[in-house]
Image (cartoon, coloured by chain):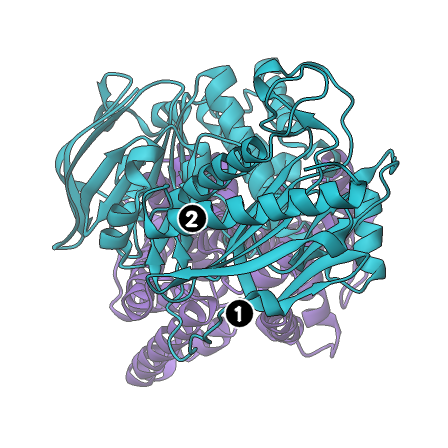
Chain colours: A cyan, B purple
Amino acid sequence: MLHIQGLTGGYGKELIVKNVSFDVQPGEILGILGPNGSGKSTLLKMISGILPKQAGTVKIADRDADSYSPKEFARNVAVLPQMHAHAFSHTVKATVELGRYPYQTGLFSSWTAEDEEAVTHAMERTGVTRYENTLIESLSGGEQQRVFVAQALAQQAPLLLLDEPTNHLDIAYQQQLLDTVRSLAVDEGKTVVSVFHDVNLAALYCDRLLLMENGEIAKIGSPQDVVREPIIHSVYKAAVKTQAHPELPKPQMTLLPSMNGSVEVPLVVDETQFAVTADSVQFHAPQSLKTVSSAVHNPGTGWYTTFVNRHVDANYDCDDVKKEMEDYLEKRGHHLTDTVGMMTAVQTLHAEIASFADEGISIVIAVTAGVGNAVDVSKAREREARVGTINTWIIVNGRLSDEAFIQAMITATEAKTRALQTENVLDPLTGTQATGTSTDSLLVAATQIGQELPYAGPITPLGKLIGTGVYECTIRAIQTYKEAKGWKG
Amino acid sequence: MRKPLIAYIVSAAVLLTAVGLGVSIGSVHVPISTLWNQGADTTATNILWKIRMPRVILAGLVGASLAIAGAAFQGLLKNPLADPYTLGVSSGASVGAVMTLFFGISIPFLGLYTLPVFSMVGAAITMFVVLGFAKLVDRGLNMETIILTGIIFGSFLGSVLSLMIALTGEELRQIISWLLGSVSMKGWNYINMILPFTIIGSFLLWMNRRELNAMLFGEDRAKHLGVDVKRRKLVILIGGSILTGAAVSVSGTIGFVGLVVPHMTRLLWGSDHRHLLTLSFMNGATLLIICDLIARTIISPTELPVGVITAFIGAPVFAFIFYRQRKGGTA
């Protein structure tokens, strides 16, 4: 649909866009990114014919852009400009009607049913029909922008050029607008080229990204190829971290603020900082720990200061466990967003908490264990799920990488299973060796201060500590449990 | 535009009423029936057809020309304070006209039209110089920049006029009263002089009504919508210069008509040029007919130049629009 070859130009003698070439296919959204002054808006202006080009070709629908008459061009290319103020105001309808200008011929009005239909459709599509007789300047910024989208839609052009379409819009309008643009591309096969200021928005909505630097293409490709730490860092000169979008296969980046002036407060966690009562095992850290867990409250990855393993009755039964847990935490004065909460039917006073240290690395392990629901995972089948039994916490004094978190969890699970084996815990239904219980929970937290600990596999120093620690604590916890139940060891 | 048909009917009715009042009121009362009553008093018929009617029609044509030109300039420049007078274009037209008289220029095939044509050339040259200079000063063409430039060039051209008048001595002293703007004692000849240009100029502007609507969103936006901006802009500026030049050549400098009328029309009926241009044309005619009526009756038997009345109304309106704009209100 759009073919750009060796496009070069700028204002006066100064070249702002240098030798840019790319293609855009029908139904595709191409996002143009780049730091301020990289030439992204200039590039768009040259494509839309506002700025003359000094070299290169712009082909639209296999025809040289220069060969179009102004009206013909507007029937093929619709531009959504950045927002600006106006001295005089049109009504919404009159504004959208201007989108049909390229279809008007002759001296007198040649307004056709087709024109009217296009205007009505464009207004419906953008949800501005109810403002039809309102003056645009009395609308909010977001509504005004939608009117201009409707105007561009009324042009019924197969190619849409957008210049920072979400500038000054709040996030709900950003989403609405870009969802509309997305559906225009997907449902109606429109070709979209849009300049973006926001890398994350562009990565979310575009099929491909074009990253500009000093008027040249620094990188063009899928969002996954372009939104990468080294590329963003070298073009934008900003320290960023990229990660996957939580729900979509799109990369997102986030700034890494340089914490100049803020001193890292040393923090070493040990078992004395844990508070154990008949109600719960609690640990409160003076600063947030990076945490990965399968807890009831705030599971997954996050940064938390308060960790609660709460005792509940063995017959605990509740329709909305999460809600009940929140009520419990709030009643005890815990800040919901800072707290990770687990539950166990085991007496929390029987918790095994111990520090382990070796080769300058230290960790704290806390285990509550009951083996009433022991299960051989290889023979698992439908069973009644009951409240948790073996809850394992691993607090690491150091900086864990993402893979270290996962390796720590693997290592801890292996150590737990080994402990069950040593204690000869059997699945009561099958009589085979149990590998865990039906509702075990695991938490790995790290201070992210001090030593870098990139790996936590079983042969690394950290892995060895976790393996030994979890194994020993679990065994002691199971023994305590058995004694309390009056079982024979 | 809410109800265009009503707008046209109201404007036409007001215009007809103004014409009726204009021809009947004066030092001698002339009943309107004289218009169609064949057996009417000969004196009344003479006053009506030889003096009042040409005067009213001339006032109407001048007012219409200035108002539609003002509406187009404002739309094109997105500037509610722009009109032939504030842009200095009227002064340019005056210089053109006075030069014609001063040097006794007469181009044979132009005949009667020599004066208006030179006036238009003066208007057009001033227009392009003012806009060119304003663009040099400030690429964004701010409202204040344009008006300030217009005032500077207007003053300069005014001094050129004064110089020419001083140099001619007695015989062109009458120019001074002409300069203040007046439509008195002109006769049908002057109507012949302005009418073709009013028609051509207004038609050129009306042809660009949709383009003016698009240009309200800025030239880039208009281009995106498929407007051939360069050509259309040129046609609009030429149309405005023709109208201004023609109006000034028959009546001298009458200020603020092109400012007040489009402003009022916009307030009442909206800024859609498809209607604004025609309505401004009609209302401009009405306003100048009424102002002229006031000018010749208010301190009768002395006649005021009509430009005094329009300035009296126009300057406060100018101040009001300026205030509203700066306070972020609507114009």
Q: Position of residue B134 (x, y in %)?
A: 33, 67
The disc at residue B296 is none
Q: Quick check: A146 left or right of B226?
A: right
Q: Quick check: B119 left or right of A184?
A: left
Q: Are marks 1 and 2 in contact (CB under 8 Å)?
A: no
Placement of the C terminus of chain B among the 4 image quadrants: bottom right
Q: Residue at x 86, y 43 (%)?
A: A313
Q: Position of residue B113 (x, y in %)?
A: 36, 50
The disc at residue B181 is 1
Tell us which disc is closer to us: 1 or 2: 2
Q: Secondary structure at mark 1?
A: loop
Q: Residue at x 77, y 36 (%)?
A: A387
Amino acid carrying label 1: it is: Gly
Amino acid carrying label 2: it is: Asp
Placement of the N terminus of chain B among the 4 image quadrants: top right
**Marks 1 and 2, how far apart at CA:** 59 Å
Q: Position of residue A432 (x, y in %)?
A: 61, 18
Decide which of A61, B221 is in the foreground and name it. Answer: A61
What chain letter is assigned to the residue under label 1? B
Q: Quick check: B41 left or right of A126?
A: right
Instruction: Find disc 2 in the rendering and name its residue.
Output: A198
What chain letter is assigned to the residue under label 2? A
Q: Secondary structure at mark 2?
A: loop
